[in-house]
Image (cartoon, helix red, strand yellow):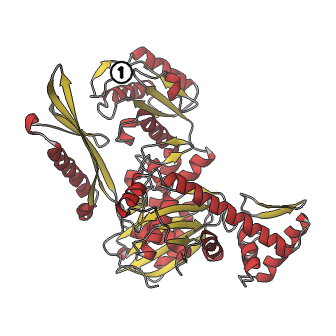
Amino acid sequence: MHIGIDVGGTSTDGVLLHRGELVQSVKKPSRQEDLAETILAVLDGLLEGRDAGAVRRLVISTTLVTNLLATQKGARTALILVPGRGLPFDFYRIAPDTYFLKGNIDFRGKVTEPVEEAEIERAVADIRARGIGRIAVAAKFSNRNRTVEQEIARAIKRLYPEATVVLGSETANRLNFPRRAVTAYYSAVTAPEWNGFADRIEEALHRRGLKAPVDILKADGGTMPLVLSRENPVETVFSGPAASAMGAVALSRRKENAVVIDIGGTTSDIALLIDGEPLHASGGALINGRLTHINALALRSLALGGDSAVKGESGRVEITAERFGPAACFGGPVATVSDAFACHRGLKLGEAERAREKIAAAAAAAGLEPGPFAAAVVEQALERLGALIQGMFREWENEPAYKVWEIVHRRRFRLDRLYGIGGAAELIVPLLADRLGVPYLVHRLAPVANALGAAVARPTLAVSLYADTQQKRYLVDREGIEGSIDNPEGFRLEEARKTAAQCLARLAAARGAAQYLNDTRVILAEQFNMIRGFSRVGKIFRVDVQIAPGLIDEFEGVAD
């Protein structure tokens, strides 16, 4: 048996799969003050009358990290940077508590200017005096030589032993120093709350006798073990929206171009499928306006959901970003977007009379009749959702996969369908699809599609290999794997590819993902010649390989 649980801002959904088929689903209100208890309640509903020992895998998607960063409620964190030569230091002032140290590592990983011990001591003393207990450290080109970051970490441990340190070389595996610094910083910011959440999850599962491996859905639509998520919790950002995309893939199984819109209680998330596969953001996840090295799907969110409160005032109609509970037709205290759509379409949803009463009260405050008020809410919601999709298309057009599709098909990209996910999709998506002029699909399992997406998502894993034949060495950035090149003259791009694939296989075997090595993809393969005078003295290679996101082998789809 496989279990998927999606912890949303409004509700927590769970599904149970047995032999590839969905046999049970559960929906519970999310208790943000105790998400572990919410997950337990969902588990109890799924496992009622069943043997917990028969569960082979549990995958959880959650908005915890996303909400921490969006509300800026993470732990106060200091950022120590070694930017090296080039731009002024202030260009890299990423965080309020940023400290700059002198020192330099060149692009091949050679330390050309060591950091000064006195500077480290002054920075750490100030951080300690300010009572900041978490420190992120990032040095330019540390992904090719992590010794400078490790030296700073050792000094922090000696001078401020109670502080927790996160290194950029351990959280991100690619070039681009600002993105690596941002990734390390946000990982440090979110770690305390995430580790507390992980502790409660492990305790709760132990209480229920569940011994199956526990994975977390990542921003790229793949999964990682819960224990590894502790090392870099920021990889779980956008876990919820990624679950939407994977849920749509699981429900449709169509090789078509589609926009996925997940209309939850408080937000709406969108993603794009190209030939049935989610589009990835080539620049990495965008957090608070800054790009990171977190592999992510191309996603966006809007603070508009089915439970968003609506109000009227002096002839104006407003959809607020506030949620006071479920829709009025389901016992909520105020009129919501769902109530307006139900009234506008004449649907008997829940307590239809209660919905009409709350809509009428909000309409009276605006000086409008209930019908025109509901119609105005519908129009405003469709306009905002349509603008979100159109705005994302302008961004999607710059993604390589989007452009490749147009080149291969020799025509402009065409949208085949709109997929509706989430509890409010059945109300809103038909009208939105009509406005966009495309067919739509709202599957009967759309309300629990996120949990299904989590349950059937397979592990993903990526490695980035750097090889320098003059130095006769290679390394896999983030994993700390290093090796020697025995035949530098004969080492070519093909050998670099094979070495990267071998390193990926070793990591996959250690993390239980070896069965998916057949879907290994080479994301990047580059070669640069090193010239001195008029002769080539060596070659530098960069190869990125990945077990691509997709569905587990056991899943065979669900009945329409």
Q: Nearer the viewer, residue 41 or 22?
A: 22
Is residue 33 in view from this perspective?
no
Which quadrant, please, contains the N terminus? bottom left
Residue 53 x/y as whole percent: 36, 74
Q: Identify which residue is drawn at 40% across, 25% down.
A: 158
- Bin the neighbour count of mark 1 within 10 Å (Cα to Cα): few under 14, some 14-19, many 20 and up: many
Residue 436 x/y as whole percent: 60, 69
> Disc 1 marks which amino acid?
Asn
Residue 76 lies in what quarter of the image? top right
Report the residue that reaches farthest toward the front. 410
Q: Identify which residue is drawn at 15% across, 27% down.
A: 536
Left or right, 391 with reference to 149: right
Q: Nearer the viewer, residue 121 or 372?
A: 372
Q: Nearer the viewer, residue 30 or 429?
A: 429
Residue position for label 1:
104
Is residue 256 in view from this perspective?
yes
Residue 204 x/y as whole percent: 48, 64
Image: 194 above or below 279: above
Q: Identify which residue is drawn at 58% across, 58% down.
A: 390
Dot 1 falls on a residue whose secondary structure is strand
Left or right, 242 with reference to 32: left
Residue 435 x/y as whole percent: 64, 70
Image: 433 above or below 153: below
